[in-house]
Amino acid sequence: MITSTKSLPLGPGYEGVRGKKIRYRDAFNSTLRAEMELDPDVFLIGEDISGGFDKDTLEPLDAWGGPFAATKGLIQDFGPERVRDAPISEAGFIGAAIGAALTGLRPVVDVMYFDFITVAYDQLLSNAAKSRYMFAGQTKVPLTLFARSGAGTGHAAQHSESFYSMLAHIPGLKVVVPSDPYSCKGLLAASIRDDDPVFVVNDKKLINLEGFVPDQSYTIQLGKGRYLSRGDDVTLIGMSYTSVVCQEASKILLEDGINAEVIDMLSLSPFDEEIIIESVKKTNRVVIVDEDTPRASMASEFAAIISDKAFDYLDAPVKRVTAPHTPVPYNKNLEEAFMPDANDVVATVKSIVD
Amino acid sequence: MKKNKSENEKKSVSISPKKLRWLYSSMYRIRRFEETMLEQTFKGNAMGVTHPSDGQEAGPVGICAHLTDKDWIGSTHRGHGHCIAKGLETNRMMAEIMGRSTGQCHGKGGSMHIADFSKGMLGANAIVGASIPLAVGAALTSKYKNNEKKSVAVAFFGDGATSQGVLHESMNLSSIWKLPVIFACENNGYAEATPSWYAVSTDDIASRAEGYGIPGLQVDGMDVFSVYDAAEQAVKRARSGEGPTFLEIKTYRYHGHFHADDPKKYRKQEEEDYFKSKDCLISFEERVTESGLMTSEDLNEIRNEIEEEIKKATDFALTSPMPDHDELYKDVYVEYSNSLLGLR
Ligand SMILES: Cc1ncc(C[n+]2csc(CCOP(=O)(O)OP(=O)(O)O)c2C)c(N)n1
Ligand SMILES: [Mg+2]
């Protein structure tokens, strides 16, 4: 039985639980609402998270409701004190959110596109992530940030990043990457309730994805990965949208008699070393799929952990399927070539499975 | 700095017929480019998000009228008007928006990243505020090299961008270094759905400049002559080494924030009607025909030429090839040891 205090099983295991099929964006929106109802110190800051005000009445119009309507409707219920539309001042309002977190509030910040966090990277790196350590535990930073990542929508080089490793690299910051409505709900709730700064990265390609979500409140433990399918021949490691890609690839591989085991990392910092090692010890082959550029990426990090902790079990080189070491191009064909897809994964698996 | 009508009329007389023609044709070119670009976006021919600038034509045109290819401009996500005013070719712009190899950036940049360094166009920029210091840097180059042309740089940005710290740092830098830069704030009243009266702590954005020791002027951005006059002085100041000027150009975007945005959700009809009644093309037409500077036949002829040009640009874009796959790996660096393998 799932309760709001316990975390839900990571894999399928919620059969019989009451719930419904909803879109990722709706899971996100309703979880924000639920967490705001639960804790009056939780509040939102972001650009156009409601969007627009009537000049005469000063009433919020909620004309925008955040990109992809992530925060739509919240201002009606919680008002402009708790749903704070911000000017375009990322360094300022993210810094202010950190200050509020240091002094007892639990801010949730919409960074809009993932790329824009770099405007406030100093605040994130030097203040959010380091305050607790520098001040020897005198304080904590219960801050949640979220943003939309990934290529595939023609938003071009400055709106399509997936630089997970630039965040996971920072000691003191946690990073989660939900891959479906179910994990979106559980990870977002866990992030907001967590006392450390957590960055929730939502790939744009997941926003309209539908999936089963239990009605009741639940969290997914930060730092845990899950199996999406089990197999003996090869381990596929995905994160965020590449978990969907891995599942697609595993179906194609099955037609050729190759049984892939798919791991969905869900958290990138901390991340689940054990599930990776456990699986690789069984399958002896591994392909890591990451939409980030390859240099100093999560894919490289996982590969390093595998060669360190499961070297004797490997029957083939650890393979990474990633974006190339380039910015994201605008043209659709080039953008598609940029993103790792199921065919790339299948071809790579076939190069190491005989 | 707001001019009254009679002064403006006096001024327009002193603009050469050639320049008058250029002003009108540039504004009309932007208008028709944006309208056509939107049509093409809705037909699915643009490959991504587009931000039209129709309604705002007088700003970039009134300013770029004083610039040459040796001068620089920095631009924004709403950059098509800046590009056209700076003399970029509409066919290569349209091709870029359609992601074609003949595009200004070979289809790799898209609507939000059109650039033409041969024309002094430093590139449109999709990070709000990010191009402002680039214009300051271009002005620094000009001062450093001290060339005969005394190049100047114009940073275009919106009201929303004035909340970014980088604008304020840029103003201070350019002021203490007396750089030949013009801060051109296109205040269209909104940043996405957020009204500037909510996001900006002053009624008068131009007054921001004062704190940095920079003259700040408010200009009617629906009237190309007002912009032209103000920009003339700002450019003169910059070229003669007197430092930066800040122009707040009061304007309006006729469409939503991006192609699929419905502005009716957050703007009032009477506001739109007010600005449309001051439309830069109509007011220009009235002014020049009433004062006998141009005839309605002249204007008609210009419009026909431009219709033809935009039609050709669209056909050019639609029939151009897509970029080769290798384009993905090109121009990440000038040189990279292990070029192709290293990038995969
Ligand atoms: C750093 C950053 N934050 C947020 C955005 C999203 N965004 C794109 S345009 C825009 C509004 C810009 O408003 P303004 O500067 O007034 O220019 P306008 O769109 O009115 O031309 C916003 C918030 C962005 N592109 N970059
Ligand atoms: Mg604006």
Image (cartoon, coloured by chain):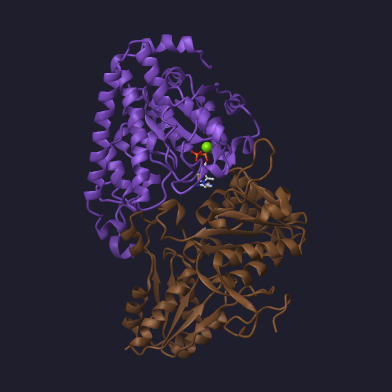
Chain colours: A brown, B purple
Observer able to see residue B104: no
Identify whether B111 is placed above or below A232: above
Observer-nearest residue: B242 or B247?
Answer: B247
Q: Position of residue A82 (x, y in %)?
A: 72, 52
Place residue B93 in its image quadrant: top left
Q: Nearer the viewer, residue B44 or B250?
A: B44
Quarter of the figure with the C terminus of chain A: bottom left
Q: Quadrant of the N terminus of chain A?
A: bottom right
Front residue of B283 and B180 = B283
Number of marks drawn:
0
Residue at image coords 51%, 14%: B3
- Comparing A67 with B201, the one in front is A67
For residue B22, above or below residue A11: above
Residue A19 in sight here: yes
Kindly identify the residue that appears in the image at 51 percent across and 40 percent down: B129
Going by the image, does A51 lie left or right of B241? right
Residue B208 location (% of width, % of height): 60, 28
Name the spot of residue B117 as percent of width and height, x first. Answer: 32, 37
> x, y (%) of residue B210?
60, 24
Q: Quadrant of residue B12?
A: top left
Q: Is residue A242 above or below residue B328?
A: below
